[in-house]
Amino acid sequence: MFSVYCPLTSAFCHLEIIMLYVVSTPIGNLGDITYRAVEVLKSVDLIACEDTRRTNILCQHYGIKVPRSSYYEYNKAVKGEHLLKLLKDGKQIALVSDAGTPGISDPGFRLIRAALDAGIKVVSIPGPTALIAALSISGFPTNKFVFEGFLPVKSGARKKRLNELQGLKQTVVFYESPHRILKTLEDMLECLGNREIAIGREVTKKFEEVIRGDIRTLIAKFKASRPRGEFVVIF
């Protein structure tokens, strides 16, 4: 039997189940975390995070003193087995990413799947995610959309995927890095034509902006001013 914090009753509850909490954290503005997320992060035995340095900033801001352990793309196999063993031993673990919701374009889903396969209860502590934040203010239809994560790094594979997407009737959303955004826009122009798009940059952060316009105009913009920040592209 294990004691876990129950935010609904503001008390510790005795449960006969092991818990992996999937906790959404701010994508920029630290004020965007939920009360429930803070309470859960304070109550668990361990926080598994993509980058301990990033999570330390959040923990220091909210006075969270729970131990942290890294779990990211390049140690996911070894560390995943270690975390799963801790869960089986009765430890309560919160999984967080650098920003947003774990499992969205990060290795978090592997630990989640392993926990489920082992009969461990997985609980979502919902909150921010960059794709929904950017989509909600893009001006594009939101009743149906496709999320692509990150497009392929190599131009040939990226063009192939864009050609597959160009005939879709719903909104398409994907993430892009500052050092690839210009090349991706050029590939989009070639594959999709000079259509209207929206780009969310640094969503919820100090220099947040949503840039709307046709692809050719945005290419010219980024050629004139070096792209900075993280991008969500919507068409």
Image (cartoon, rainbow, N blue to C red):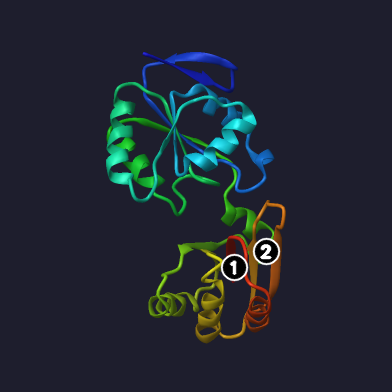
Instruction: Describe the element under mark 1 as helix, strand or loop.
Output: strand
Q: Amino acid at mark 1?
A: Ile
Report the side of 65 relative to 201 (left or right): left
Residue lying at 34% horizontally and 21% vertically, measured from the top left? 90
Residue 69 at x, y percent in the picture: 41, 34
Q: Nearer the viewer, residue 66 or 188?
A: 66
Is 73 placed above or below 8 here?
below
- Which residue is the site of mark 1? 234
Q: Amino acid at mark 2?
A: Ser
Residue 44 at x, y percent in the picture: 47, 24
Q: Name the image quarter holding residue 86.
A: top left
Q: Going from the N terminus, do you reach mark 1 or mark 2 first? A: 2
Separation of residues labelled 1 and 2 (CA atoms): 7 Å
Near mark 1 (Cα within 10 A), the count class, few <14, some 14-19 or many ≥20, is many
Q: Which circle marks residue 138 in the picture?
A: 2
Residue 197 at x, y percent in the picture: 63, 73
Confirm or deny contact between disc 1 and disc 2 (CB under 8 A): yes
Q: Nearer the viewer, residue 167 or 162?
A: 162
Residue lying at 55% horizontally and 47% vertically, measured from the top left? 99
Residue lying at 59% horizontally and 36% vertically, measured from the top left? 58
Q: Name the image quarter holding residue 128.
A: top right
Instruction: Describe the element under mark 2 as helix, strand or loop.
Output: loop
Is 160 placed above or below 94 here?
below
Residue 89 at x, y percent in the picture: 30, 22
